[in-house]
Amino acid sequence: MVALQNGCSGWETLQEVLTKTVDPRTPREELEFYELSLLDEANELGTRHVVRQWYAEWSEIDRQIVWDQEEVEYFWILAEATKRYAERRLALAEKGFIYSDMNLF
């Protein structure tokens, strides 16, 4: 998880990696991952908040983790983006993705 404080606008970045296991020592070859992020993007119109969900799994062919199925949503209101982040996190938990790297700290 990465969280950076940004003076006026609150969170600049919130990033969490979720897996289906409760054992952090499980080899990555046996894991599926979701990265769930809440990001701020500054532009000429103001700050736009981005909720991104990205799926990854080990590829035996490539011998590395392969990221796929990126889903991105944009919000002008932080409360709406935060709500959507929480909804996505709950949906992933219901699919069994209950282990979070945020629990390590």
Image: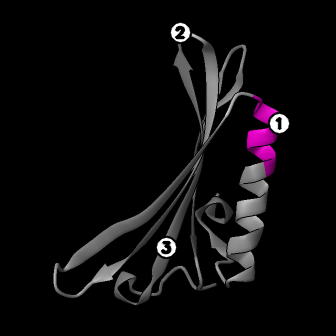
Tag in front: 3 or 2: 2
User: Is 2 drawn above or below residue 29 in the view shown?
Assistant: above
Q: Which residue is mark 2?
A: 44
Dot 1 alpha-carbon crowd within 10 angstroms: few under 14, some 14 to 19, many 20 or more? few
Tag in front: 3 or 1: 1
User: Is 79 drawn above or below residue 30 in the view shown?
Assistant: above
Which element type, helix, strand or loop, lies under badge 1? Answer: helix
Q: Are marks 3 and 1 in contact (CB under 8 Å)?
A: no
Q: Which residue is mark 3?
A: 33
Residue 63 lies left or right of residue 37; in this view the side is left
Report the coloring of the rendering: one colour
Please report the bounds of the magenta region as a residue range.
77-83
Residue 12, quarter of the rendered image: top right
**Is any atom of residue 15 visible in this view?**
no
Across and down, in percent, residue 58 comes to 32, 81
Please state which of residues 62 and 87 is positioned toward the viewer in this rendering: 87
Residue 44 lies left or right of residue 56; in this view the side is right
Which element type, helix, strand or loop, lies under badge 3? Answer: strand
| Marks 3/1: CA–CA distance | 26 Å
Residue 31 lies left or right of residue 77; in this view the side is left
- Residue at 16%, 78% (x, y): give it: 62
Label whose residue precedes the other's in the sequence (3 or 1): 3
Disc 1 marks which amino acid?
Ala
**Is any atom of residue 90 visible in this view?**
yes
Disc 3 marks which amino acid?
Phe
- Residue at 41%, 90% (x, y): give it: 30
- Residue at 63%, 20% (x, y): give it: 47
User: Is 41 drawn above or below residue 51 in the view shown?
Assistant: above
Q: Which residue is mark 1?
A: 79
Label whose residue precedes the other's in the sequence (3 or 2): 3
Magenta part mainly helix, strand or loop? helix
**Magenta region includes residue 78:** yes
